[in-house]
Image (cartoon, helix red, strand yellow):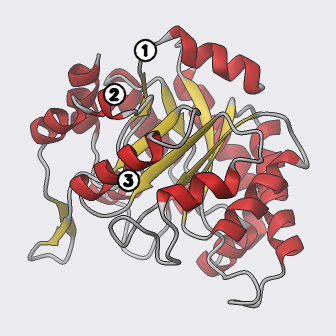
Amino acid sequence: MNKEELKAFFDQNQTIIADGATGTNLIARGLPPGTTAEHWVLEKPDEILKLHSDFIKNGAHIILTSTFGGSKIRLAHAGIEGDFEKVNSSGAKIAKNAAKGTNTLVAGSMGPLGEMIKPLGTLAYDEALQLYADQSRILVDAGADLIVIETQFDINEAKAAIEGVRSVSKIGLVCSFSFDRGVKTMMGVSPTKFADGVKEYDLSAVGINCGKSILDNQQCLEELFSITDLPIWFKPNAGLPEVNESGTAVYSLSPQEMGDFARNWPSMGAKIIGGCCGTSPAHLKEIARAVE
């Protein structure tokens, strides 16, 4: 699906519902500590399929593949670098299977590489570009309808990611930042600096995901809306995490509370709405109900 086709999909609906969290939901369903979602793409594809299906049943028009950590670098850290192509291809095919027979789109998810680009790190810009190109090529070939470069925090890496995708495909493309210091990223990037930094590229939407509190994310949303004409992708966490007695992070907002917040997001500028960490299918149901 190219940019024009994705724009037509966006225009058909006043608000688009994206899915919820991958990692926190899989942990709740038995993913062992220290094990990545990409491991389960290989070992328990039925669990990945069920999560996708649960999000679709609860209103998702777009689901993300379980390939956030699917770059060669991240898979090497996870000890499964030899399965790079299989992880990404299977991740896309599982999601496509879940979406079969529905109008739900599959977005190929690509997260940060996990290593900094020079001069702050040791990774060369061209190397980062190629890593994103390699991953996106597999996702596109396996049937992804669009690509989402998400949870970014560094303008240089975001540019490398965008250029990497564009070197292999004209597919519809979303770039989303995580403002994990409240209203800036760990690199000091504000929503305004983010929008200015990527405005030269052919994007279908810009976005905000993860981050800190709902209120911080809403402030970022309002700032981004004031300076961009592109649709805005908005997937905040379900509040702030609290560690329970078993050492598991539990996010503070109930499904109903998140739905109450979500009711205002379209008027704040969000076009594609979902949730990040802590956002369960039950949360998504309330989000969809509130905004639709």
Query: Mark 3 Cα within 10 Å, few/some/many (few <14, many 20+)?
Result: many
Q: Secondary structure at mark 3?
A: helix
Q: Secondary structure at mark 2?
A: helix
Question: Left or right: where does residue 252 sit relative to residue 27?
Answer: left
Residue at 53% across / 21% down in the picture?
Answer: 104
Mark 3 → mark 2, Cα distance in angstroms: 14 Å
Up the image or down, 146 lies above or below 57; here it is below
Numbered circle sitting on residue 220: 3
Mark 1 → mark 3, Cα distance in angstroms: 21 Å
Residue in the foreground of this view, choosing between 47 and 73: 73
Question: Where residue 159 sits in the image (x, y, percent)?
Answer: 74, 60
The amino acid type, in three-letter code, at marker 2 is Pro
Where does label 1 land, which residue?
A: 14
Answer with the quarter of the image where residue 134 lies: bottom right
**Mark earlier in primary sequence (1, 2):** 1
The amino acid type, in three-letter code, at marker 3 is Cys
Where does label 2 land, which residue?
A: 266
Tags 1 and 2 touching, CB below 8 Å: yes
Question: Left or right: where does residue 198 sit relative to residue 132?
Answer: left
Q: Secondary structure at mark 1?
A: loop
Q: Quadrant of the N terminus?
A: top right
Answer with the quarter of the image where residue 92 lies: top right
The amino acid type, in three-letter code, at marker 1 is Gln
Query: Can residue 256 be seen here?
Result: yes
